[in-house]
Image: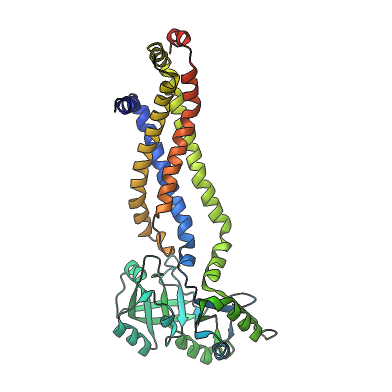
Amino acid sequence: MFYLKLILKNVFRAKLRTGLTLAGLVIAVMAFGLLQTVVDAWFAGANASSNARMITRNAISLVFPMPAYYRERIKAIPAVKSVSHSQWFGGIYKEPKNFFPQFAVDHENYFEMFPEFLFKPEELLAFKRDRQGAVVGRKLADQFGWKVGDTVPIRGTIFPGEWQFTIRAIYDGRDEVALTRQFYFHWDYINEWLKKRFPRRADQIGVFNIEVSDPTRTAEVARAIDAEFKNSLAETLTETEKAFQLGFVAQMETIVLAIRVVSFVVIFIIMAVVANTMAMTARERIVEYATLKALGFSPRFVAGLVFGEAMMLSLIGAGLGILLTFPVAAGFADSPAGAIFAAFKVNGMTVWMQWACAIVVGLVAALVPGWRSARIRIVEGLRHVG
């Protein structure tokens, strides 16, 4: 207890220097946690994917559609439980900054594949009955203040024109990683319009959503589907839902890597700051350390004071930084910028990494000052004028 009190007293002896160092530690640890949470958020959607769902798209690119009649041929393949489809819409709500994913889907069975979407049965039924009906996620509805019965105008880009949708259902997520920032409506609605305006673009599908009866047979099913349409005008590429999601993450792999690197650079910088603080502290207390050794205290005891002070400084800063990470992350998640992620939450691994970084910072920062303090000769230390 005496040893701990002595270290605590030493930590706050130079209050201004300690306060500034702690402020740097708090910001660095908090920034590290937020950056790591951003990286985790990139993978949240992929990690939440079902291993029983698959995606079939055009083998060339998502930009190119596939004929709608592929659906029945896919459904006939063994181990395929059900088939639905969706089409990216890419419209603008009021202004471009109000971006959110919009999909035209098969209203009859699309949501049966997604048990993580929780509906009120009467609302889902109302959506199915209304050709202009729409389904929105809870986060999206909260963001724009929408409620059931509201009319949402969207200006089409891929499908030109002013489109009017009526919100018939708002769904919640089964858990925190469920996607609740999506906008869905009837594929039939835009397909009928295409038949009148652009007949050659009608009856075309962006992706087929497939549910298999046995998740262990996904590779077999993928090969069978792609073989079915080999050498056709629209060859297919079938992959698991997770692989499909990770394909989008891979497109931003450089950004994700840069965020990881920056998070550790922040820790490296604060390590240098704490090391400088401990070096100044040790230099100022050379006489004290020499006196302790003259009184019979061992070099290990002296080095322990330096290491203890550095560790306490790092752990206090880390503790405050970790505590601040949670409300800051929650605030970011509720902002328009945070809305692009499926889930933005600090997980346990990130907290452990923050503590681990703090321990490393404390140990490394005290290494040289502690070694020098332990090796100081009594005569030279007492003669020192700091």
Residue at (48% x, 9% y) in the render: 380
Camera-side residue of 87 and 327: 327
Q: Residue at position x 39%, y 13% from top?
A: 296
Q: Position of residue 203 (x, y in %)?
A: 55, 89
**Image x and y of residue 298, in percent:** 42, 18
- Image position of 327 with respect to 190: above or below: above
Residue at image x 48%, y 42%? 266
Q: Quadrant of residue 220?
A: bottom right
Q: Quadrant of the N terminus?
A: top left
Q: Is residue 159 left or right of residue 320?
A: right
| Viewport quadrant of the C terminus | top left
Q: Depth check: 230 or 201 in front?
A: 230
Residue 325: give x, y in percent of width and height: 37, 49
Q: Is residue 311 above or below residue 132?
A: above
* Res 292 visible: yes
Say left or right for 379 vs 218.
left
Q: Is residue 64 visible?
A: no
